[in-house]
Amino acid sequence: MFIAAAIAILVVMMLALARALMGPTVYDRILAVNMFGTKTVLLISVLGVIAGRADFIDIALVYALINFISIIAVLRFFEYADERKAEQES
Amino acid sequence: MRDLFAIVMLFGIYSLLSAGFFVSMDAVDVALTEAAVGAGITTVLMLGTLALTARTEKRKGHGPLLPLLVVIVTGAALIYATLDMPYFADPDAPAHQHVAPRYIQESGTEIGIPNIVTSVLASYRGFDTLGEVVVIFAAGLGVLILLGVAGDRRHDASPSTMQHHLVLRVITKSLIPLILLYALYIQFHGDYGPGGGFQAGVIFAAAFILYSIIYGLNSAERIISPAVLRFLMAAGVLIFSGTGVAALLLGGNYLDYDFLAHDPVHGQHVGILLVEFGVGVTVTAVMISVFFNFSGRSNARQETGKQ
Amino acid sequence: METVVNILSWAFLLAGAFLGISGAVGLFRFPEFFTRLHAASVTDSLCAALIVLGLILQSASLMLIIKLVLILLILTYTSPTAAHALAKAALHGGLKPVPDGEGEPSSKS
C-alpha cells in the first residue's frame, strides 16, 4: 500500500513539473515548485517508513523548512523587483 | 529559455531530484546536505544575485548548436566511461578495497560513534574537512572583499515592506525558535544519525535569513551585527585548527584526537565534537554574511535609485 | 485491532493520494492562476496531513512516530501560509482574478 501511495506522489510530482515548465505566468511556476517540494517531503517520509529508518524523516523535515523559506524568499524577491521597476518608471 | 528566474527554479528542482537519488542510494548524510544547501541556500543566494543583476540573459553571439554539441560529446564520453566502472555496491570495486574496509571495521573500536560517515569526515579525514572549512571561509572573505564590508549603507528610513504581512510575521515568529532548535539537534546528533556541522550551519543560517526576509535587514542586523559575523567566521576556523594544535601540544600529531582526553576513544569524541562545532559556526556565519551583503547592496541600489 | 489500524491507515493513504492527484490535475488543467492556486494549495495541505496520518498509524518505532508528528505540524503550519503569501504576492504584482474565462497577466511572463 505504501507503494501505491509512493506512485501516486510521483504522478503528482510529474504533473507539477509539467506545470512548472509550461506555466504562462511566473507565479504558476512558483506554485508548481512549492507543490513539488511538499510532495518531495511526503515521498521521502513514505520511503522512510517503508525502510523503517527514522533518519530519512530528518531529511524530510529539513526539506519542509527549506521549501518554506525559499518560497518566501522568492516572493520577497518579486516585491523588490516590482518596487524597483515602479520607481524606475515613476 | 533565457529567463534566469525560471532557470533558478529549475535548478532548485534539480537539486531536489539529486537529493532523492541520494536517498534511494542510502546515502543519508549527503542527501541531507544536498537538500539543505542545494535546494535552499543556493536558490536564495542566486535570487539575491538576480536582484542585483538582470532578470534575462543577454543574447549570445553564437547559436545554441555549438554548446549542444559540446554537451552531447561530453555526456557520451562520460557514459562510455561508466560502462567500465564496477557495479554499484560491488565488494571488489577498488573504492571499497584499500582504506574503506579498515575504516568500517575499526571505526567502532577506535572511535565508537555509530555514524561512520561522521567518523570518517571528522576524524579519519580530518584534514580534508579542515580544507573544506577554510574554503568556505575564503568564499565568505571573497564576497566581503568584492561587495564591500556592508558598512557604507544608509539605513533606510522607510518601514519594511513586509509590515503589512501579518500572517507571515506571526508564523515566522513562532517558527524560527523551532528551526534554531532543530539546527542544534542536527549539529549534535551528527554522531548518531545524519547531520553534522555543515547541515546544521546551513539550517541555522536559514532561520536568520528567514527573519531578515520578513522583518527587514535592519532588524536582523541589530540582532546579529556584521562585526559579530566576521568574528564568528574566523572563530570557527580557529576552533578547528586550534583543536589540531591542542593535539600537537598534548603530545600527538596535528589533529590526532587520541591525545585530547584521558583515553583515546574519549579523545576522539571530544575532538569530533569540537571540530563539528567549528564547522557549524563558520558555515552559519558565512551564509548569513553573504546574504546580508547581497541584501544590503540591493537596498543601497534602491536608495541611490530613489535619489 | 491490527486490522482496524491497517484499514484506517489504508483509508488515509488512499484518501490522501486521491486528493493529491486531483489537486495536481487541477493544477494542470484549470484555466487561470487563482483557480490553480486554490486547487493546488487546498488539496496540498489536506493531502499531506492525510498521508502523514496514514504513515503514523503504520510506523514501527516511537522515534518514527514523533518525527512524523513533527512533519505533520510543520506542513500544516507552513503550506497554507505559503499559499497565502503567494496569493498576496500575485495580487500585489498585478495579476487579477478573472471570474469567467482566461486570466490576463498584466506584466509578467
Image (cartoon, rainbow, N blue to C red):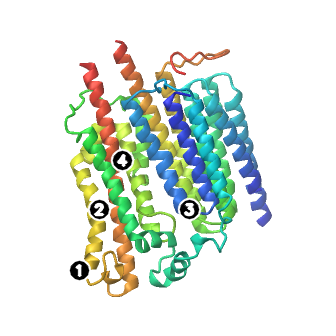
Amino acid at circle 3: Val
- Residue pointed to by mark 1: B249
CA–CA distance in space, label 3 to label 4? 25 Å
- Residue pointed to by mark 3: B28
- Residue pointed to by mark 4: B208
Instruction: Using the image as rendered, state which of residue B117 and residue C90 is in the foreground.
Output: B117
CA–CA distance in space, label 3 to label 2? 26 Å
Tell me the residue at 31%/67% (across/down): B240
Tell me the residue at 29%/62% (across/down): B237
First in sequence: mark 3 or mark 4?
3
- Residue pointed to by mark 2: B237
Mark 3: few/some/many CA within 10 Å (<14, 14-19, 20+): many
Instruction: Using the image as rendered, state which of residue B258 and residue C107 is in the foreground.
Output: B258
Parent chain of label 3: B
CA–CA distance in space, label 1 to label 3? 36 Å
Q: Based on the displayed image, in which of its 4 quarters is residue C69 positioned? A: bottom right
**Disc 3 and disc 4 in contact, CB within 8 angstroms:** no
The N terminus of chain B lies in which quarter of the figure? top right
Q: Based on the displayed image, in which of its 4 quarters is residue C80 positioned? A: top right
1 and 2 marks on the same chain = yes
Give above or below for B114 relative to A67: below
Mark 1: few/some/many CA within 10 Å (<14, 14-19, 20+): few
Q: Nearer the viewer, mark 4 or mark 2?
A: 2
Would residue B61 appear left or right of B139 to someone viewing this image? right
Instruction: Using the image as rendered, state which of residue B236 and residue B60 is in the foreground.
Output: B60
Mark 2: few/some/many CA within 10 Å (<14, 14-19, 20+): many
Helix, strand or loop under label 4: helix
Tell me the residue at 61%/37% (across/down): B69
One can see residue C12 in this view = no
